[in-house]
Image (tube, rainbow, N blue to C red):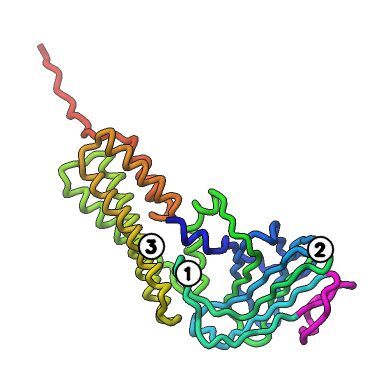
Amino acid sequence: MLSWASMAHVPLISEEKENISLAMHISDPAKSWAIYGFIKPHVVHYYSFDVKRGQRIYLSLIKSADPQEKDFVPAMILIGPKIETAGNAPDWIQLPKGLGGLVAATKNASSATYEPFGPSSFIKMAELDLPAPESGRYYVAVYSNVAQGHYGLAAGYREEFSFADRIASPIRLIFVWLWSGQSPGMILIPYFVAEIISILIFWRSSRRTAYSFAGTMAAFLFLATSATVIGQTAFNLTRAPFGPEVYISLTIALFHSILGVIGLRLARSEAGMLQRTLMGIIGTVALLAGSGLIMGPILAIAASMLPSLKSPVPSTPDPR
């Protein structure tokens, strides 16, 4: 249920700092992060982190698989104490006195990599994995010599996800899809369609109660998440080759659809204690699993506590 989160990085939005003294700081360089940004030619984005001698430094640079950015070739340099300067760094890269700069070898990836837990796709560009030669502050400089484009800097190797990370993952995932070149409409249209359908079904139902309304809305948001996963799978397979990872995406889509079907059946049934308990459980599971774009789980949990009877029609008082 939480497999996509356990295999992914915690996404961050780049602050795009162009001066090394103002570098975006990575608070825990061992934790697995993915920083997404956009860069223009001859511009440098700086990132910093603190490590102790011998501690592992892992960095990976990727770029969007958008065909419009095929000429974009980002590069990165690790800057720090006792780093042996290697590679041809541009003269406009800032190297503080006493620090060396290691240019990561750029790979020529023949095809994009499909990531099933998003799902998404990207192209691997460079990678560094080494022990820190000295305790202190290190920097990463990301730059492009020719074209502009979207890049991602993965830092860290320890996959840890807080409760807040799991709750915010659906919103962060939308940003990753925008980063890859998709439009907001393409990403959000399944949710708009699902809510329109849910309102129409509720309006035609004989059970027009607060419990039924919130439960029906939640269920269709879960189904919309399933449709989104299937749509994103199909979209990213136009950029990356088909592989066994696709079945992971389809399994995740099936899981979201099961949440939606169960939620819909509960919303259209009598709201007894068992049904309310199950609705609350479904909402909690969906919240942790990233289903329903946060609002779906909230509606499901709220439905478990909302009235299940129609408001009585007030009687006219007898004038006698």
Instruction: Report the number of discs.
Output: 3
Q: Is residue 67 above or below residue 315?
A: below
Q: Which residue is mark 3?
A: 252
- Provide residue 162's location: percent of width, then percent of height: 57, 51
Of the two numbered discs 3 and 2 on the same chain, state the one appearing first in sequence: 2
Of the two numbered discs 1 and 3 on the same chain, state the one appearing first in sequence: 1
Chain part drawn in magenta: 81-102
Q: Which mark is residue 53?
A: 2
Q: Secondary structure at mark 2?
A: loop
Determine which quarter of the picture holds residue 130.
Answer: bottom right
Q: Which mark is residue 146?
A: none
Q: Main secondary structure of the magenta part?
A: loop
| Side (left or right) of 20 relative to 66 | right
- State the separation of the CA atoms marked 3 and 2: 41 Å
Q: Secondary structure at mark 1?
A: helix
The amino acid on which the numbered mark 2 sits, given as a three-letter code, is Arg
- Provide residue 51's location: percent of width, then percent of height: 77, 61
Q: Secondary structure at mark 3?
A: helix
- What residue lies at 28% left-to-right and 36% top-to-bottom? 274
Q: Are marks 2 and 1 in contact (CB under 8 Å)?
A: no
- What residue lies at 60% left-to-right and 64% top-to-bottom? 13
Q: Which residue is mark 1?
A: 177
In-front residue for pair 50/160: 160
Magenta stretch holds residue 91: yes
